[in-house]
Image (spheres, grey):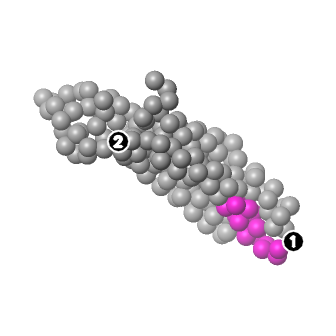
Amino acid sequence: RFIGDRCLIHLSLGLLFAYITLDDMFSIHEVLGEAISVHALGAMGLGKLAEPVGELIAFGGVGLLFIVVLWWTVRNSSARAICQGMVIMFFLSIGAFAGIFIDFLHSALGGVGPLINGLMTLLEDGTETVMLSLAALAAISMKSLPRQSVAGVDAEKAFAALSPCLEME
C-alpha cells in the first residue's frame, strides 16, 4: 500500500528531509545563491548583502515548490495523516527557518573573526541537525511507540490519550 492515506504526505516530507540533508552536505542553496547574486543581483548595488539575498531567493524558490507539494498532499490526506505530518513538519520547519535566519545573519555580519564565524557555523548546522534528528525520531516514534509497553504502562493507550492525531493503525 504505497499510495495510501499516509504515504503521500510522508513521501513529500521524506523528500523535504532529504533535500534539507543534501543542502547541508553540498551547500546547494549557497551555490545557487552565489550564482543568483552574481548574475541577477550584482548590478543592484546590494554590496555584501547580495549573496545572502541570493541564498534567500534560492532557498525560497525550493521552499515554494515544497509548500505546493505539501499543500497538495495535505488536501489528499486524512486528518490522522495530516496530524502526523504536522508533527514532523514542525521540526523540519524550525530547522529550516533557524538555518536560514542564522545563515543570513552570518553572511550579513561578514568578517567578524574566526571565533564568531565558527560559533555561527556551529549554531546553524547544529540547529538544523538537531531538528532533522527530532523529525526522524518523531516519525519513527509514531510508527513504533504504540506497539510497545514500557514499565508496565500500555504505551498504545498512553500515546493515544496524549494526542489522537498520533495514533497508529
Three-letter code for the amino acid on which mark 2 is drawn? Arg
Q: Residue at x 57, y 39 (%)?
A: 15
Residue 5 visible (yes or no): yes
Q: Residue at x 58, y 51 (%)?
A: 68
Three-letter code for the amino acid on which mark 1 is drawn? Ala
Q: Quadrant of residue 146?
A: top left
Image location of residue 99, percent across then percent down: 56, 56
Q: Residue at x 67, y 61 (%)?
A: 56
- Depth check, front residue: 106 or 89: 89
Asked whether 47 falls inside the magenta stretch, the response is yes
- Rounded to the nearest whole Å, what is the CA distance between mark 1 and mark 2? 49 Å
Q: Residue at x 76, y 67 (%)?
A: 50
Element type where label 1 sits in the image: helix
Residue 11, label in figure: none
Q: Quadrant of residue 134?
A: top left
Residue bearing the label numbered 1: 43
- Depth check, front residue: 41 or 108: 41
Image location of residue 74, percent across then percent down: 47, 46
Q: Are marks 1 and 2 in contact (CB under 8 Å)?
A: no
Residue 80, label in figure: 2
Mark 2, Cα crowd under 10 Å, few <14 / some 14-19 / many 20+, is some
Left or right side of 132 for 117: right
Image location of residue 143, percent across then percent down: 35, 31
Region rendered in magenta? 43-57
Left or right side of 162 for 113: right
Element type where label 2 sits in the image: helix
Classified by dominant secondary structure, the portion drawn in magenta counts as helix
